[in-house]
Amino acid sequence: MGRTDYLDKLNDKQKEAAMYTEGPLLILAGAGSGKTSTMTCRIAYLIREMGVHPYNILAVTFTNKAAKEMRERVQRLIGEGVNMWILTFHSACLRILRSHAEILDYGRDFAVYDPTDQKTVVKNICKELNIDTKKFTPGYFLGVISHCKEQRIHAREYNSIFGNDFREQMVGQVYDRYEKTLKKNNAMDFDDLLLKTVELFEADEEVLLKYQNRFRYIMVDEYQDTNLIQYAFVKLLADARDEDGNIRRNICVVGDDDQCIYQWRGADIRNILEFEKDFPGAKTVKLEQNYRSTANILAAAHSVISHNRGRKAKKLWTDAEDGKKIVYYNADDEKDEAYFIASEINRIAAQQTQPDGVPDYREFAVLYRTNAQSRTFEEALSNRAIPYRVLGGLRYYDRKEIKDMMCYMRLVQNRADDLALVRIINEPKRGVGGKTLQKLQALAQVRGVGLFNVLLDDEIISSFSGKVAGNLKNFAGLIETYGIERESMKISDLYDGLLVNSGYMKALEDQHTVEADSRLENLMEFKSVIIGYEKEDPNMSLAEFMERIALLADVDNHDSEENAVTLMTLHSAKGLEFPYVFMPGMEDGLFPGWRAFDREDGLEEERRLCYVGITRAKKRLWMTSAQTRTLYGRTDYTRESAFLRELDKSLIEGDSIYEKKDRKAEGVFRDGASGSSVFKPFDQLKYAKAQTKQKAAAMAKAGDTDFAVGDRVSHPKFGEGTVLETGGSVIRIKFADQDRKLALGIAPLKKL
């Protein structure tokens, strides 16, 4: 390769950016505009043409994969080993801290605690402070601590800034002990790697000067995703002075404000929007030529994102053909939506088979807003024998919370299912640790009975501590009662009762984390599965339902090399591209989500997410919605997404979202005469949880709960009986056929 042959492969704007080397530079790189090629060519230009030593260049990005790819591409361009830092933020900071940790009163051999280590530390602290980790989980505390560190709020400052109520004061205590524990153990967590490096630079001018002099050229990838600490890190390094005392600021940042979709994770879009303000005299180069998508897809993306106010003015364009218009399909419901998408995939894949005659499914992706949506597509694709793989998360039925609740239902159906019992006996936490479980299993083996039979033996259970014994009795009583009642209950009622009365729902609610909310969404969506089967067969038994689910959920995941359709969330799709893309669930309240309507910046971030989804498509794009959707067990009429209404209608083919008659239902409708919106999104998850609790409470009220030994009672299934024993939430009754243990608050018992 000649001296500048590599530059000849760049377009004019890319070349302008690659050859601008002195002073601050903002490269606004739109989706599919070749930013990686531009960055690597700029590094090669600095080294090969400007004579800059690789030692004096720092390039930081967010993932090891991105750093590795950039390093390999630079090496191919310069034709020698790369003696420069092309690293993630965390890796770069770790290297710096290893050399200067003693300045911050740490040993250079300090440990770096991973999330598992962090949880262990917080669990121990909660134990010391007598904090109930069922109500306040380690994940909750760590989430708050991480956010504080990103905002540079130290433990010593927390209570003076917050500390207004009991919860905040408790967080302050945990945060303080957490920091002291890490320091005592000569350890840092991942947030500390960034925070402590900034503190090091601010505390020791000589150290800062050393790295300012070394890294004379700084490059930052995905700048729109940087948080406050990352911004402080690069700004301190960039604000270096040359020999004449002038601020050098040879910093080049690459990003796209239209693809800032991680604000919920700490990203601050102001970093890229205010770059010229932070670095006066900055040059801005816009990479607007797209090499990925057809003209119609780009026009559709622009017609949506142009509604955002907080963005830099730019518009992607391409030399490629116009291509097909965006297909819009307004389905009857979510099943029809999934059926349509599976049918379209089948139809197009059949037209472009591989050399061996097998349809090529790797070119298709279904990008949805929430993980809970994947279930209907998994079912539709499975029914058509279309292979698929779920990225950015497990298959719907493989998710922990779904498996846990299915095991509750399995155990209710078959109390000899030891595998299901072992999985859920301590889910949620009941104090049943490994030693307790081993003892129960040993006793079951000696007696030659199943584990559940051991739980029904009062003599055995009384050998455990009072709290554990009580929890085991309650667990056994819960399963026993629902096992008895299962034939007379709707499956959805049984599910609601188990979810609430097992404590599983409350345990997740008490975590107050994004992960817990996502799990609750999936659990509420599982109600939609159950209700769907109940509609098909109102008399379906629990056993039949479990068989149907087991057969469906037994399909194995496909690895990334397999010929399979990709299912993933829109957040997970960033940085990827597919020839054929489907974006389902284009409805207000789902996408954009209901929370987005609370504030303008929330709606703008959702719109950026929509932009990211549209620009993943190379050849064709489908968008779908459903006239009615059952989500989290509730069926509602819907309204097409605000983003669909923003799309240039000349780019759409299929059902018209502009001419379709408006529908009305339960306060969710559009004024058909004026077209003005009176739609008010609601919190579907909050509503679904409330309904589940109400149903469980209603079932509990169906029976009396205040009994004494000798009372005569009646049960709709077992007839009349006499109370033999009461204790906690379990009651033992002598019926005509046999003695039975039932759970108070669930069994429909009435005093006579």
Image (cartoon, helix red, strand yellow):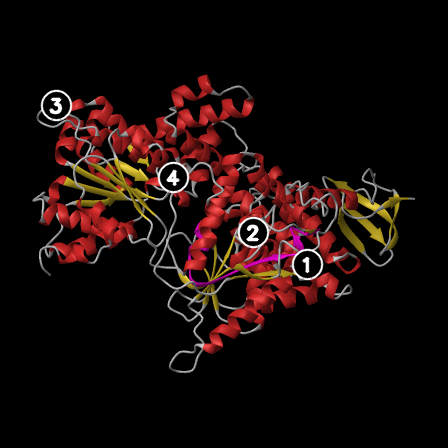
Q: Earlier in the sequence, mark 2 or mark 3?
A: 3
Specify few, some or many for label 1: CA neighbours under 10 Å numbering under 14, 14-19, or 20 or more: some
Q: Secondary structure at mark 3?
A: loop
Q: CA distance from mark 3 to mark 1?
A: 71 Å
Q: CA–CA distance between discs 1 and 2?
A: 31 Å
Q: Which residue is mark 4?
A: 312
Which is nearer the eye, 581 or 571?
581
Per the model, the C-alpha gap separating discs 1 and 4 is 47 Å
Instruction: Identify residue type, mark 1.
Output: Ile
Instruction: Mark 4 or mark 3: name the one nearer the start of the chain.
Output: 3
The residue that disc 1 covers is 530
Residue closer to the observer: 531 or 129? 531
Q: Point out the frontmost of discs 1 and 4.
A: 4
Q: Where is residue 361, by image quadrant? A: bottom left
Q: Secondary structure at mark 1?
A: helix
User: Gap in Å between the C-alphas at discs 4 and 2?
Assistant: 22 Å
Q: Earlier in the sequence, mark 1 or mark 4?
A: 4
Seen in the picture, residue 663 relative to 619 is either above or below; the reply is above
Label 2 and label 3: CA atoms lie apart by 54 Å
Tell me if residue 33 is in the magenta stretch: no
Contact between marks 1 and 2 (CB within 8 A): the answer is no
- Amino acid type for the residue under numbered disc 2: Leu
Residue 91 appears left or right of 493: left
**Magenta part mainly helix, strand or loop?**
strand
Locate residue 669, reporting x and y percent.
Answer: 70, 46
Q: Mark 1 vs mark 2: give the one in front.
A: 2
Q: Which residues are magenta?
A: 612-636
Decide which of tag 1 and tag 2 comes sooner along the chain.
1
How crowded is the residue under tag 2: few (<14 C-alpha within 10 Å), some, or many (20+)?
A: many
Observer-nearest of 511 and 408: 511
Residue drawn at x 80%, y 40% as measured from the top left:
705
